[in-house]
Amino acid sequence: MLKQKQKIKNLLWYLYVPIFIIVIGIFLFPKSAYLSTITREKLIELTNKTRQENNLPILRVNEKLNKAASNKAKDILKYNKFAHNFNNRRFSQWIKDVNYDYYIVGENLAIDFADSESIMKAWLNSPSHRKNILSKQYTEIGMSVQKGNYKGNPTIVVAQLFGRPSKQELSSMALLEANSKKYNLEIKKQKLNTSPALVIANIQNKSGNNLTTKNPLLREIDKFLNIKQFILIYTAQIFLLIYLIACIIYNSVKNNLYQKQNFSRIQ
Protein backbone atom coordinates (compact mmCIF):
# COMPACT_ATOMS: atom_id res chain seq x y z
CA MET A 1 0.00 0.00 0.00
CA LEU A 2 2.86 2.37 0.87
CA LYS A 3 4.63 1.54 -2.39
CA GLN A 4 1.47 2.30 -4.36
CA LYS A 5 1.13 5.69 -2.61
CA GLN A 6 4.77 6.45 -3.36
CA LYS A 7 4.27 5.57 -7.05
CA ILE A 8 1.27 7.91 -7.20
CA LYS A 9 3.31 10.71 -5.62
CA ASN A 10 6.15 10.14 -8.10
CA LEU A 11 3.72 10.17 -11.02
CA LEU A 12 2.19 13.44 -9.82
CA TRP A 13 5.67 14.94 -9.53
CA TYR A 14 6.50 13.86 -13.09
CA LEU A 15 3.33 15.56 -14.30
CA TYR A 16 4.02 18.76 -12.32
CA VAL A 17 6.66 20.07 -14.72
CA PRO A 18 4.60 19.90 -17.97
CA ILE A 19 1.53 21.31 -16.19
CA PHE A 20 3.64 24.19 -14.90
CA ILE A 21 5.00 24.84 -18.41
CA ILE A 22 1.50 24.85 -19.91
CA VAL A 23 0.18 27.26 -17.27
CA ILE A 24 3.10 29.64 -17.78
CA GLY A 25 2.58 29.43 -21.54
CA ILE A 26 -1.11 30.30 -21.23
CA PHE A 27 -0.51 33.37 -19.06
CA LEU A 28 2.64 34.70 -20.71
CA PHE A 29 1.81 33.84 -24.32
CA PRO A 30 -1.99 33.87 -24.61
CA LYS A 31 -2.01 34.19 -28.40
CA SER A 32 -0.02 31.02 -28.87
CA ALA A 33 -2.23 29.18 -26.40
CA TYR A 34 -5.69 29.75 -27.80
CA LEU A 35 -5.60 32.16 -30.74
CA SER A 36 -3.13 30.39 -32.99
CA THR A 37 -5.36 28.15 -35.09
CA ILE A 38 -8.60 28.13 -37.02
CA THR A 39 -10.53 24.88 -36.69
CA ARG A 40 -13.91 23.67 -37.85
CA GLU A 41 -14.76 22.44 -34.36
CA LYS A 42 -14.01 25.81 -32.74
CA LEU A 43 -16.05 27.77 -35.28
CA ILE A 44 -19.03 25.43 -34.86
CA GLU A 45 -18.69 25.76 -31.10
CA LEU A 46 -18.64 29.57 -31.33
CA THR A 47 -21.62 29.54 -33.71
CA ASN A 48 -23.74 27.39 -31.43
CA LYS A 49 -22.65 29.36 -28.38
CA THR A 50 -23.86 32.56 -30.07
CA ARG A 51 -27.18 30.91 -30.92
CA GLN A 52 -27.66 29.73 -27.34
CA GLU A 53 -26.95 33.23 -26.06
CA ASN A 54 -29.80 34.41 -28.30
CA ASN A 55 -32.20 31.67 -27.10
CA LEU A 56 -31.91 29.66 -30.31
CA PRO A 57 -31.39 25.88 -30.65
CA ILE A 58 -27.94 24.70 -31.60
CA LEU A 59 -27.22 23.46 -35.13
CA ARG A 60 -26.50 19.79 -35.83
CA VAL A 61 -23.38 18.98 -37.82
CA ASN A 62 -24.25 17.40 -41.16
CA GLU A 63 -21.52 15.46 -43.02
CA LYS A 64 -22.98 16.29 -46.43
CA LEU A 65 -22.77 20.00 -45.62
CA ASN A 66 -19.21 19.47 -44.36
CA LYS A 67 -18.33 17.88 -47.70
CA ALA A 68 -20.00 20.67 -49.67
CA ALA A 69 -18.16 23.31 -47.62
CA SER A 70 -14.86 21.50 -48.22
CA ASN A 71 -15.47 21.38 -51.98
CA LYS A 72 -16.40 25.08 -52.03
CA ALA A 73 -13.28 26.16 -50.09
CA LYS A 74 -11.04 24.05 -52.33
CA ASP A 75 -12.58 25.59 -55.45
CA ILE A 76 -12.04 29.12 -54.09
CA LEU A 77 -8.34 28.33 -53.83
CA LYS A 78 -8.24 26.45 -57.12
CA TYR A 79 -9.90 29.18 -59.21
CA ASN A 80 -8.77 32.21 -57.13
CA LYS A 81 -12.41 33.30 -56.81
CA PHE A 82 -13.47 34.49 -53.38
CA ALA A 83 -17.21 34.79 -53.93
CA HIS A 84 -20.45 32.96 -53.22
CA ASN A 85 -21.18 32.41 -56.91
CA PHE A 86 -18.58 31.91 -59.65
CA ASN A 87 -17.91 29.88 -62.81
CA ASN A 88 -21.64 30.16 -63.62
CA ARG A 89 -22.50 28.28 -60.41
CA ARG A 90 -24.59 29.51 -57.52
CA PHE A 91 -23.34 28.61 -54.03
CA SER A 92 -26.24 26.16 -53.66
CA GLN A 93 -24.82 24.06 -56.51
CA TRP A 94 -21.97 22.83 -54.29
CA ILE A 95 -24.65 21.65 -51.84
CA LYS A 96 -26.66 19.93 -54.56
CA ASP A 97 -23.49 18.17 -55.75
CA VAL A 98 -23.33 16.18 -52.48
CA ASN A 99 -27.02 15.19 -52.74
CA TYR A 100 -28.18 17.26 -49.77
CA ASP A 101 -31.92 17.69 -50.36
CA TYR A 102 -32.74 21.00 -48.69
CA TYR A 103 -35.61 23.29 -47.89
CA ILE A 104 -33.35 26.33 -47.37
CA VAL A 105 -29.57 26.93 -47.28
CA GLY A 106 -27.13 29.77 -46.58
CA GLU A 107 -23.40 30.46 -46.71
CA ASN A 108 -20.74 32.50 -44.91
CA LEU A 109 -17.15 32.82 -46.19
CA ALA A 110 -13.91 34.17 -44.70
CA ILE A 111 -10.30 34.45 -45.85
CA ASP A 112 -6.94 35.59 -44.44
CA PHE A 113 -7.86 35.54 -40.75
CA ALA A 114 -5.44 34.47 -38.01
CA ASP A 115 -7.87 32.85 -35.55
CA SER A 116 -11.41 31.54 -35.12
CA GLU A 117 -12.49 34.29 -32.74
CA SER A 118 -11.71 37.11 -35.18
CA ILE A 119 -13.70 35.35 -37.93
CA MET A 120 -16.74 35.03 -35.70
CA LYS A 121 -16.41 38.65 -34.61
CA ALA A 122 -16.29 39.82 -38.24
CA TRP A 123 -19.31 37.70 -39.18
CA LEU A 124 -21.34 38.97 -36.23
CA ASN A 125 -20.48 42.58 -37.10
CA SER A 126 -21.90 42.03 -40.60
CA PRO A 127 -25.74 42.12 -40.73
CA SER A 128 -26.04 39.53 -43.52
CA HIS A 129 -23.59 37.07 -41.93
CA ARG A 130 -25.12 37.57 -38.50
CA LYS A 131 -28.54 36.86 -39.99
CA ASN A 132 -27.31 33.49 -41.22
CA ILE A 133 -25.80 32.57 -37.86
CA LEU A 134 -28.94 33.54 -35.93
CA SER A 135 -31.57 32.35 -38.40
CA LYS A 136 -34.40 30.31 -36.88
CA GLN A 137 -34.90 28.49 -40.16
CA TYR A 138 -31.61 26.60 -40.12
CA THR A 139 -31.22 23.35 -38.21
CA GLU A 140 -27.90 22.00 -39.56
CA ILE A 141 -24.40 23.25 -40.22
CA GLY A 142 -21.35 22.27 -42.26
CA MET A 143 -17.89 23.81 -42.08
CA SER A 144 -14.52 23.61 -43.81
CA VAL A 145 -11.14 25.21 -43.10
CA GLN A 146 -8.72 24.94 -46.02
CA LYS A 147 -5.10 26.07 -46.17
CA GLY A 148 -3.58 26.96 -49.51
CA ASN A 149 -2.49 29.77 -51.83
CA TYR A 150 -4.84 32.52 -53.00
CA LYS A 151 -3.46 34.65 -55.84
CA GLY A 152 0.07 33.61 -54.93
CA ASN A 153 -0.17 34.23 -51.17
CA PRO A 154 -0.50 31.59 -48.42
CA THR A 155 -3.88 31.84 -46.74
CA ILE A 156 -6.75 30.06 -44.98
CA VAL A 157 -10.23 29.90 -46.50
CA VAL A 158 -13.27 29.17 -44.34
CA ALA A 159 -16.62 28.08 -45.75
CA GLN A 160 -19.63 27.86 -43.43
CA LEU A 161 -22.87 26.33 -44.73
CA PHE A 162 -26.28 26.35 -43.11
CA GLY A 163 -29.24 24.19 -44.06
CA ARG A 164 -32.65 22.88 -43.25
CA PRO A 165 -33.27 19.48 -44.85
CA SER A 166 -36.41 18.78 -46.84
CA LYS A 167 -39.03 16.34 -45.57
CA GLN A 168 -37.67 13.71 -47.93
CA GLU A 169 -34.14 14.17 -46.57
CA LEU A 170 -35.43 13.98 -42.98
CA SER A 171 -37.26 10.72 -43.76
CA SER A 172 -34.09 9.21 -45.23
CA MET A 173 -32.06 10.30 -42.20
CA ALA A 174 -34.64 8.84 -39.78
CA LEU A 175 -34.64 5.50 -41.65
CA LEU A 176 -30.84 5.40 -41.67
CA GLU A 177 -30.69 6.15 -37.94
CA ALA A 178 -33.30 3.47 -37.16
CA ASN A 179 -31.36 0.85 -39.17
CA SER A 180 -28.14 1.86 -37.44
CA LYS A 181 -29.70 1.47 -33.98
CA LYS A 182 -31.14 -1.93 -34.95
CA TYR A 183 -27.75 -3.11 -36.22
CA ASN A 184 -25.94 -1.94 -33.06
CA LEU A 185 -28.54 -3.67 -30.89
CA GLU A 186 -28.05 -6.97 -32.76
CA ILE A 187 -24.27 -6.71 -32.35
CA LYS A 188 -24.65 -6.13 -28.59
CA LYS A 189 -26.92 -9.19 -28.29
CA GLN A 190 -24.40 -11.34 -30.14
CA LYS A 191 -21.62 -10.20 -27.83
CA LEU A 192 -23.69 -10.94 -24.73
CA ASN A 193 -24.57 -14.42 -26.00
CA THR A 194 -21.12 -15.49 -27.21
CA SER A 195 -18.51 -13.61 -25.18
CA PRO A 196 -17.63 -14.97 -21.70
CA ALA A 197 -17.23 -12.44 -18.92
CA LEU A 198 -13.59 -11.75 -18.12
CA VAL A 199 -12.56 -10.61 -14.65
CA ILE A 200 -9.06 -9.24 -14.12
CA ALA A 201 -7.98 -9.15 -10.47
CA ASN A 202 -4.76 -8.57 -8.56
CA ILE A 203 -3.38 -11.93 -7.34
CA GLN A 204 -2.26 -11.67 -3.75
CA ASN A 205 -0.84 -14.18 -1.30
CA LYS A 206 -2.21 -14.90 2.17
CA SER A 207 -0.19 -12.12 3.81
CA GLY A 208 -1.77 -9.56 1.47
CA ASN A 209 1.45 -8.74 -0.40
CA ASN A 210 1.57 -8.78 -4.19
CA LEU A 211 3.18 -11.95 -5.56
CA THR A 212 5.66 -9.91 -7.58
CA THR A 213 7.49 -9.08 -4.34
CA LYS A 214 8.18 -12.81 -3.75
CA ASN A 215 9.51 -13.63 -7.22
CA PRO A 216 12.99 -12.20 -8.14
CA LEU A 217 12.28 -12.36 -11.86
CA LEU A 218 8.99 -10.48 -11.48
CA ARG A 219 10.75 -7.92 -9.27
CA GLU A 220 13.27 -7.24 -12.04
CA ILE A 221 10.49 -6.89 -14.59
CA ASP A 222 8.72 -4.44 -12.28
CA LYS A 223 11.91 -2.39 -11.94
CA PHE A 224 12.38 -2.36 -15.71
CA LEU A 225 8.81 -1.16 -16.25
CA ASN A 226 9.28 1.62 -13.69
CA ILE A 227 12.48 2.79 -15.43
CA LYS A 228 10.72 2.64 -18.81
CA GLN A 229 7.82 4.70 -17.41
CA PHE A 230 10.27 7.26 -16.01
CA ILE A 231 12.03 7.61 -19.40
CA LEU A 232 8.76 7.91 -21.31
CA ILE A 233 7.38 10.61 -19.00
CA TYR A 234 10.51 12.77 -19.13
CA THR A 235 10.82 12.29 -22.90
CA ALA A 236 7.22 13.50 -23.22
CA GLN A 237 8.06 16.53 -21.07
CA ILE A 238 11.02 17.42 -23.32
CA PHE A 239 8.91 17.14 -26.47
CA LEU A 240 6.16 19.22 -24.82
CA LEU A 241 8.66 21.96 -23.98
CA ILE A 242 10.06 21.94 -27.53
CA TYR A 243 6.52 22.07 -28.95
CA LEU A 244 5.57 25.00 -26.72
CA ILE A 245 8.68 26.96 -27.72
CA ALA A 246 8.01 26.22 -31.39
CA CYS A 247 4.39 27.42 -31.00
CA ILE A 248 5.57 30.66 -29.38
CA ILE A 249 8.08 31.36 -32.17
CA TYR A 250 5.62 30.39 -34.93
CA ASN A 251 2.79 32.55 -33.59
CA SER A 252 5.09 35.48 -32.96
CA VAL A 253 6.21 35.40 -36.60
CA LYS A 254 2.65 34.81 -37.87
CA ASN A 255 1.15 37.63 -35.78
CA ASN A 256 3.82 40.06 -36.99
CA LEU A 257 3.07 39.01 -40.57
CA TYR A 258 -0.66 39.59 -40.18
CA GLN A 259 -0.07 42.94 -38.51
CA LYS A 260 2.11 44.10 -41.40
CA GLN A 261 -0.10 42.69 -44.15
CA ASN A 262 -3.75 42.18 -43.24
CA PHE A 263 -6.12 41.22 -46.07
CA SER A 264 -8.86 39.63 -43.94
CA ARG A 265 -12.21 39.53 -45.72
CA ILE A 266 -15.61 37.96 -45.36
CA GLN A 267 -18.17 37.27 -48.04
Image (spheres, rainbow, N blue to C red):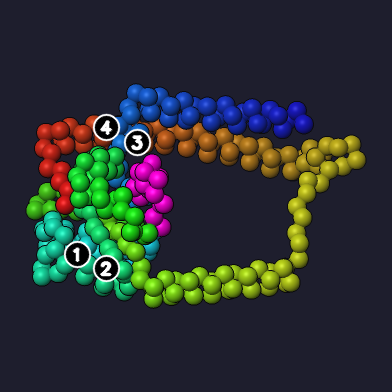
Nearer the camera: disc 4 or disc 3: 3
Q: How crowded is the residue under tag 3: few (<14 C-alpha within 10 Å), some, or many (20+)?
A: few
Disc 4 or 3, which lies upstream in sequence? 3
Residue 190 image point, x, y percent: 68, 73
Q: Secondary structure at mark 2?
A: helix
Q: Which residue is mark 4?
A: 249
Q: Is residue 101 left or right of residue 203?
A: left
Residue 95 - label: 2
Q: Please report contact status of discs 3 and 1: CB closer than 8 Å, yes or no.
A: no
Viewer-side residue, 29 vs 94 = 94
Tell whether label 1 touches label 2 (CB within 8 Å).
yes
Tell which of 157 and 22 is nearer to you: 157
**Label 2 vs label 1: CA separation?**
7 Å
Q: Nearer the viewer, residue 80 or 170?
A: 170
Looking at the picture, tell me which residue is in the foreground, 154 or 217. 154
Give the residue drawn at x 32%, y 27%: 29
User: At label 1, which amino acid type do we have?
Assistant: Phe
According to the image, label 3 marks what residue? 34
What residue would you read off at disc 1?
91
Residue 267 appears left or right of 176: left
- Going by the numbered disc 3, the residue's amino acid type is Tyr
